[in-house]
Image: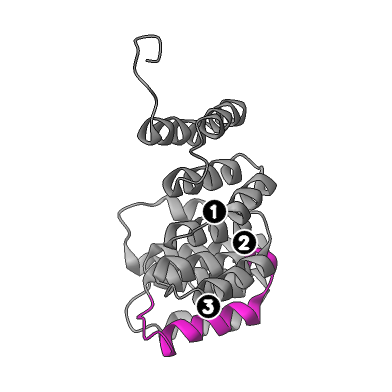
Amino acid sequence: MELQGCTADCFTFSSVITACTNLSALTSGQQCHCRIFMKGLEQNLALANSLIDMYAKSRSIQDSRIIFSEMCCRDWVSWTSMMIALGSHGYGHEAVELLNQMVKSGIKPDMIVFIAVLTACSHAGLIDRGLTYFKLMTTTYKMRASQEIYACVIDLLVRGGRFKEAYDIIRSMPSAPDESVWAAFLGECKAHGQPTMTARQVLDLKPKKSGIFDSAP
């Protein structure tokens, strides 16, 4: 493109970074990052957000942290991308602290943010902390928990071996649990060598896809 006389802009670099992210092509992504820096575009908000995601998905979380710390301004995407990055790498405490910083900065968390935080707590074994944020979401922020949120809470509990609490939450859900909720429960039951109490309930769902039963005990 450049040989044809066209100059790469922010949209060009964003497209290339997305391609590198999808392919986990870290070296190519680093080369693109260097070009962005040489052109003085490193403070472009959209590009910085894309680089955070690219480095995190390429297992280079420290580079994501550096980019995030050097940003002169951050939006909802910046905070959420960094929280997801930290959570996926097992840095649950840092992800939770980032949520607190985001709220202090004046940005209101939404459902996606709480999914990121609950997932981070689950991976880091922060069970009670995750339950606190689940309660905060439903009481302080008056959000109605989605099936995906319930799946995160179930995963949080069963990863910590609290199967009875997880099952009680499933039974108390305001709407019938979908496949994602049961899959989270059944998958961890098998991983922990626990007998499942839920075969009949799962079969009653009659899901369109049977893949979740492949790992059922």
Label 2 – label 3 distance at C-alpha = 40 Å
Determine the residue positioned at 49% across, 85% down.
136
Amino acid type shown at disc 1? Ser
Amino acid type shown at disc 3? Lys
Q: Nearer the viewer, residue 136 or 147?
A: 136
Determine the residue positioned at 62% across, 27% down.
27
Vertical placement of 38 versus 213: above or below? above
Left or right of 99, for residue 9: left
Q: Within 10 angstroms of label 1, few (less than 14), some, or many (20 or more) residues? A: few
Of all residues, the one furthest to the bottom in this rendering is: 139
The number of discs equals 3
Label 3 – label 1 distance at C-alpha = 42 Å
Q: Earlier in the sequence, mark 3 or mark 1?
A: 3
Vertical placement of 133 versus 203: above or below? below
Q: Earlier in the sequence, mark 2 or mark 3?
A: 3
Circle 2 sits on which residue?
190
Element marked by disc 2: helix
Q: Nearer the viewer, residue 131 or 48?
A: 48
Contact flag, marks 2 and 3 (Cβ < 8 Å): no
Of all residues, the one furthest to the top in this rendering is: 3
Q: Nearer the viewer, mark 2 or mark 3?
A: 3
**Mark number, residue 215:** 1
Circle 3 sits on which residue?
104
The span picked out in magenta is 122-145
Amino acid type shown at disc 2? Lys
Q: Nearer the viewer, mark 3 or mark 1?
A: 3
Q: Earlier in the sequence, mark 1 or mark 2?
A: 2
Contact flag, marks 1 and 2 (Cβ < 8 Å): yes
